[in-house]
Image (cartoon, helix red, strand yellow):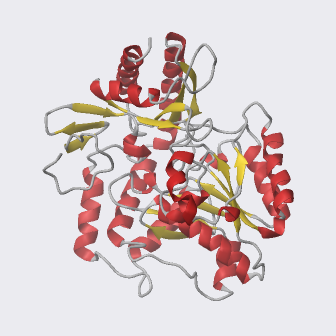
Amino acid sequence: MTDSSVFYRSRKSYPVAVRAEGVYVFDDRGQRYLDGSSGALVANIGHGRTAVADAMAAQARRLAFVHGSQFSSDVLEEYASRLAGFLKLPGFRFWAVSGGSEATESAIKLARQYHAERGDLERYRVVTRRPSYHGASLGALAASGMGARRELYTPLMNESAWPKLSKPNPELSGEADAERLRTLLEELGPQTVAAFMAEPVVGASDAALAPSPGYHARIAEICREYGVLFIADEVMSGMGRCGAPLAVQLHGPVTPDIVVLGKGLAAGYAPLAGLMASPTVHDTVMNGSGAFKHGFTYAGHPVSVAAGLSVLDTVQNENLVEAARERGTQLLAGLRTLRSRHPQVLEARGHGLLLGLILGDPATGEACAGPGLAERVALAARTRGLLTYPGTGAVDGTRGDHLLLGPPLSIRPAEIEELLAALDGALSDTGG
């Protein structure tokens, strides 16, 4: 749009969205799109919920803004308590921010301060995985193992602070897979490591990849053994999307030290993200210097928190966590049928309504059938009225194509079938 004053994310042409309802988005030309990716896996309860809009308006009339260094608010106090209960994290404290990258930055800085308060000043490294994606701000990007998004900015990063573990291997038992962390910690010197951070179900960097059962429980044990904090990045996978309040608990009780949250907290109705800190982490900081040495202007914004509270009401009242499991089973079965019909689909996988297709060369079985395959499938799907989330780089940072799917948790069975039909057509349009 050459006559626009907007700085767009790329040079491609953007349709103008004018309204949205349920699982559909409508543009100014009258085109209807089934939101098969909830934007970027954000719109968990669907679009056009008037109850959320009404809650935000009521809060804005009553109290629109206070600064977190001066006041709390009743809506923030209620939300933090409700959220801890929903996530089954008793005693955890909620630190509110405006987006997932801010939440990741907060977790990294909290881990560093936790160790500093205990006198472990040598602990500064944060181990993450390759591939992974933890956000776009500089610290969050440094923590990420996603080559294409990271490459330009590597001169700004202290790479020694961000060691990378290779990605989960579902062919191993979860326990054996997790033991690779122990090996890396021994190589690094565990006394230098502040935290291990991972997405329980990987999102943008390697669509819906998850380790075998037992992985996260063993990771938590290893972290405790070496005095390393375990940070679960649930920005995309949390809040019911994977069929459990937290994806780290899909295979049994696991309690990380810090949980990073975003996206589904306010489900796109307002900017809201944050972290949940364990009682030990919180108390160590507060009983030490007495303050977390960090903050953002809009953290705990009352209108955003009111949106989050109304979204949480919807998730619980409509049993959307259970719905994610049921509709996810239906969608995954359909995706596996598509795999049998389209040879460029190498794998269909995921949990709940965080699902992915691995695209590639059927002759070699490699997920790198030439650059741009995922983008071509996504474009063909958009032409058919379906929005998806394409990605690349899972093989080596550049090669590897995948398509992420994550419709609203409120999607109905007939809409799942509509999604599958459009995707079937898009795959036919782009490769057979």
- In percent of width and height, residue 258 lies at 64, 63
Nearest the eye: 257 or 385: 385
Horizontal side of 289 relative to 306 (left or right) equals: right
- In percent of width and height, residue 314 lies at 39, 50
Q: Is residue 99 above or below residue 210?
A: below
Asked where in the image residue 120 lies, by quadrant, the reply is bottom right
**Residue 235 in view, yes or no:** no
**Residue 76 in view, yes or no:** yes
Q: What residue is at 44 percent from the left and 51 percent from the top? A: 264
Q: What residue is at 21 percent from the left and 37 percent from the top? A: 26
**Quadrant of the rendering where the N terminus is positioned:** top left
**Quadrant of the rendering where the C terminus is positioned:** top left
Q: What residue is at 41 percent from the left and 45 percent from the top? A: 40
The tally of labels here is 0
Q: What residue is at 28 percent from the left and 25 percent from the top? A: 383
- In percent of width and height, residue 319 lies at 46, 43
Q: Is residue 341 above or below residue 287?
A: above
Nearest the eye: 146 or 11: 11
- In percent of width and height, residue 359 lies at 53, 25
Horizontal side of 223 relative to 113 (left or right) equals: right
